[in-house]
Image: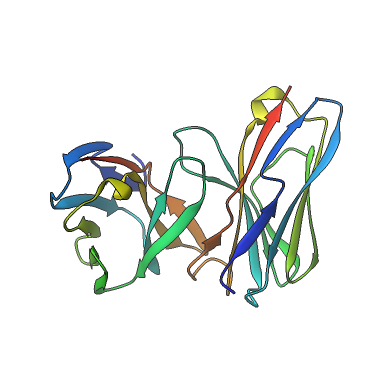
Amino acid sequence: DTEVTQTPKHLVMGMTNKKSLKCEQHMGHRAMYWYKQKAKKPPELMFVYSYEKLSINESVPSRFSPECPNSSLLNLHLHALQPEDSALYLCASSLVAGIDEQYFGPGTRLTVT
Amino acid sequence: KNEVEQSPQNLTAQEGEFITINCSYSVGISALHWLQQHPGGGIVSLFMLSSGKKKHGRLIATINIQEKHSSLHITASHPRDSAVYICAVSSNYQLIWGAGTKLIIKP
C-alpha cells in the first residue's frame, strides 16, 4: 500500500467553526507533513512530525493545531479560521524526515466563509 | 533570488514533441525531486535523484551536481502529460520548492 489518504476532500466552514482534517498512511513511514497550497503557488510547509513528535512548526498561527495520535495518523485541528486560510491542505509522508521521497495525499480543499 | 529556479514558467507544445523543463538551485542538497501536480490537487513524486540520470517510461531526469542544475525531459508528449511539474530540493532536512512549470500539450 503506497497510498496516503486524506479526509474530507472538500470542507466549507465558518469562521467560528471547529473542524479537523485527517491523514492516514500504512507504509511504515515515520515522518508526516502538513502543507498549505494557495492557487498557482507551490506548497508551503506547515508542520513536520518525526517519530510522532512535532519537529518543525513553520510559525503557523495557533488556530491550526496538529496532532499525531500514532505513526499512521495525522490530524490538523482548525478553529477560528480566517477567509485567507482557504486553500488546499496537503498531507505527505516519508520514511525519514527531510531526506526521503515524500508521498502526498490528494488534499483537502478548504473554504472558510 | 529564489533558492530553486525553474524555467520555463509556462510551456505549450503539440502532442509528440520532446519537452524539457529546467531547474537550477543555489543551496547544498542531499537530493533533488521532480513532482507532478494535476489540476485538482494531488502531487505525485516522479523522481528523486542525487546524481546522474533516471528514466521511467517516457520521462527522463538528469542532474549535474557541479553545475547545480537538473532537467526533466518528456519524450513523445501526450495531452495527458498536461500538468504542473515542480522541482524541489532536499536541503537541511526540508524540501525547498521551485515555482513550478505549467505544461499544456495540445492534441
Quadrant in which residue B91 is drawn = bottom left
In the figure, is residue B10 to the left or right of B13?
Answer: right
Residue B61, above or below A45: below
| Position of the N terminus of chain A by quadrant | bottom right
| Position of the C terminus of chain A by quadrant | top right
Q: Percent x, y for residue A48?
A: 65, 58
Residue A67 in view in this figure:
yes
| Residue drawn where x is 28% and y is 37% of the image | B9
Q: How is the image coloured?
A: rainbow
In the figure, is residue A33 to the left or right of B102?
Answer: right
Query: Which residue lies most toward the front here?
Result: B107
| Residue drawn where x is 73% and y is 69% of the image | A72
| Residue drawn where x is 75% and y is 64% of the image | A73
Image mark count = 0
| Residue drawn where x is 66% and y is 73% of the image | A30
Query: Which residue lies most toward the left here?
Result: B17
Q: Percent x, y for residue B45?
A: 43, 61
Query: Which residue lies most toward the bottom here?
Result: A28
Residue A24, above or below B82: below
Quadrant in which residue B55 is drawn = bottom left
Q: Percent x, y for residue A38?
A: 54, 34
Q: Nearer the viewer, residue B81 or A84?
A: B81
Residue B29 in view in this figure:
no
In the figure, is residue A64 to the left or right of A6?
Answer: right
